Structure formats: C-alpha cells, structure tokens
Image (cartoon, rainbow, N blue to C red):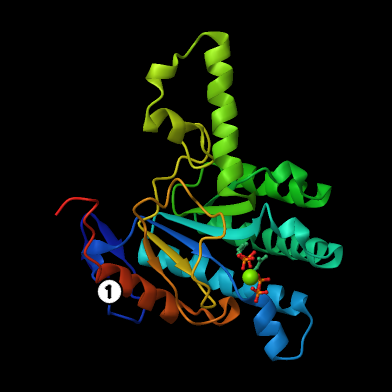
Amino acid sequence: MWPCGHIYLRDTGFDMLDKERMPVHVAIIMDGNGRWAKERGLPRLAGHNAGMKAMKKIVDHSDKLGIKYLTVYAFSTENWKRSIAEVSGIFKLLVTYVNSDLKELVENNVRVRVLGDYSALPKDAVKSLERTLRDTHDNTGLQFNIALNYGGRDEIRRAVVAIGERIAEGTLSPEDITDEVIARELYTGSLHADVPDPELIIRTSGELRLSNFLLWQSAYSELVFPDVLWPDFTPEEYEKAIADYQSRDRRFGGR
Ligand code: IPE
Ligand code: IPE
Ligand code: MG
C-alpha cells in the first residue's frame, strides 16, 4: 500500500506511477476489436468478445489504482451503421458481461452508470442494464460509466433541447446560460451521471481521433494513443498510458 493523499492504493505490481498525481477520471475509446479478430482469421465478434475480457481487467485495475471514475466508449451513435449481425452480437456480449459480472461488481463496490440513450437497445439489454444500475446504485467505490448509443453531438443537442424547453417555460433566460448550465444537462452532468471532465482520454489501435466521444468534456483532456489493439490492452499498458499522462505539462491556457 502507498499513501496517496488520504486514500491508499493496493500494490499493483507496477510502480512507475506517481501516486500523488493519479487522474480522477479516465475515459477510454476501446478501438481495434475488428482488426484483432482479422489478424487471427476470426469473425469480428470474436474480437468483441476478447474486448469484453480486456475491459473487465481494466475495470478491476482502475479500482486497484484508486481511480474514481472510468468511462468506456462501448457503442457510438454511428455504430448502428454496422451489420445487424455485428450490432446484435455486440449487445448480446454486453448482456452476458453484465449478467455474469453483476455479483462481482456489487462485491467490489462498483457503481455502474450509462452515458447515452440506452432505451434504443434491444429489450434484454435494457433489462440487464437497468438491473445493474439498480443493484449497484448505492455502491461508493469506482464509478464505471459505459457509453452506449453515445455521441457527443447528440449529447450536446439534447442539452440544447432541455435548455430551450426551460426558456420556453419561462424558468430560464438566455443570458443565464453559463458553461455550468450546459454541463449539467449532459449525460455526464449533475442531473445525470455526475462525472467530472476526464483528465485523460486513451484511444487504442493507433487511430488519432475522438470519433464523437466526450466532445464538450474533452476540452482540456490529455490524449494518449497506445499502439495496441483493444483486446491486447493490458493493465500494464494502462499504467504506461497513465505514466504518459503524468509526464504532461497541463497549462489550461495559462503559462
Ligand atoms: C471497437 O472496435 C468496438 C466498437 C466500436 C463497438 P472496432 O469494432 O471498431 O474495431 P476495428 O476498428 O474495426 O478494428
Ligand atoms: C469509436 O470507434 C467508437 C467505439 C469505440 C465504441 P469506431 O471504430 O466506431 O470509430 P471510427 O469509425 O474508426 O472513427
Ligand atoms: Mg474501430
């Protein structure tokens, strides 16, 4: 155990990290499942299955590192463009993961939240997710946010609609729209999952873009792009990405 402010980190076996400068919120674009499968001559769904296993290890490891919020991009508003077989396969895997791991998540004091309009998912997926949200509701450890049917532009559009409705009702005037008023309405805002902006965003697989992920919240995030495909992203790779983040000079427009 290392002292880290007032919290203690469990021994993770790697010690390259500055325990005083751990990010509070890490967000991950889990990319490269399809290429991982292709390299092995396997169907794309085998890649998504391997990706779920990698995700599970990263959830456990976030908890061990004392990270307070972990957000993973699991399905974007654009991913509906994929084949029906792939889309429904991804949701089946999600149901399997959520159902088989619910007990462990509850035992580990993990609180699960969803970012995105998950009501558009297949019925069984909605049911499993709702049960998970309910059963982990009172947990106080790691908050694990799964971005599902999530898009940054869709999120901002919804916030604009909600604010427009308040103006139409006469409960808000345009000059009172601050950054905070907008942020509150986002999926990450205090009216919803209540997550601070991520200090660190990781995208695996070597692609150098955000693909509509956390557009508002990423304003001052540090971006790290490990060259491994998501199923190959191990806790050790995770710590390397955090070490990279810790080496950055964050200036926030100041000097
Ligand atoms: C990320 O892996 C998972 C989802 C988008 C659901 P991909 O399926 O995008 O993998 P690549 O980019 O085709 O390798
Ligand atoms: C981003 O990956 C979405 C998720 C990881 C869920 P994509 O594979 O969909 O992004 P693009 O198409 O390469 O930009
Ligand atoms: Mg991809």
Q: Is residue 190 visible?
A: no
Say which quarter of the image contains residue 15: bottom left
Of 175 and 170, the residue lying toward us: 175
Q: Image quadrant for the N terminus?
A: bottom left
Disc 1, ligand 2: is the CB inside 8 Å? no
Q: Is residue 214 above or below residue 157?
A: below
Measured as percent of width and height from the top left, residue 86 is found at 80, 67
Of 243 and 152, the residue lying toward us: 152
Q: Is residue 223 above or below residue 191?
A: below
Is label 1 in a helix, a strand or a loop?
A: loop
For the point 76% across and 52% down, which residue is it?
A: 125
For the point 70% across and 74% down, which residue is it?
A: 49
For the point 27% across and 79% down, which residue is it?
A: 16
Amino acid at circle 1: Leu
Given the current orientation, which residue lies at the most extreme top position?
A: 170
Measured as percent of width and height from the top left, residue 122 is found at 81, 50
Given the current orientation, which residue lies at the most extreme bottom position?
A: 40
Badge 1 crowding class, 10 Å Cα cut-off, few under 14, some 14 to 19, many 20 or more, is: some
For the point 61% across and 76% down, which residue is it?
A: 32
Q: Is residue 134 above or below residue 249?
A: above
Q: Image quadrant for the C terminus?
A: bottom left
Measured as percent of width and height from the top left, residue 198 is found at 40, 54
Give the labeled residue for mark 1: 17
Of 103 and 204, the residue lying toward us: 204
Of 35 and 130, the residue lying toward us: 35
Given the current orientation, which residue lies at the most extreme left position?
A: 255
Ligand 2 in which quarter:
bottom right
Say which quarter of the image contains residue 13: bottom left
Q: Is residue 177 above or below residue 58?
A: above
Q: Is residue 34 visible?
A: yes
Q: Is residue 115 left or right of residue 44?
A: left
Q: Is residue 242 left or right of residue 53?
A: left
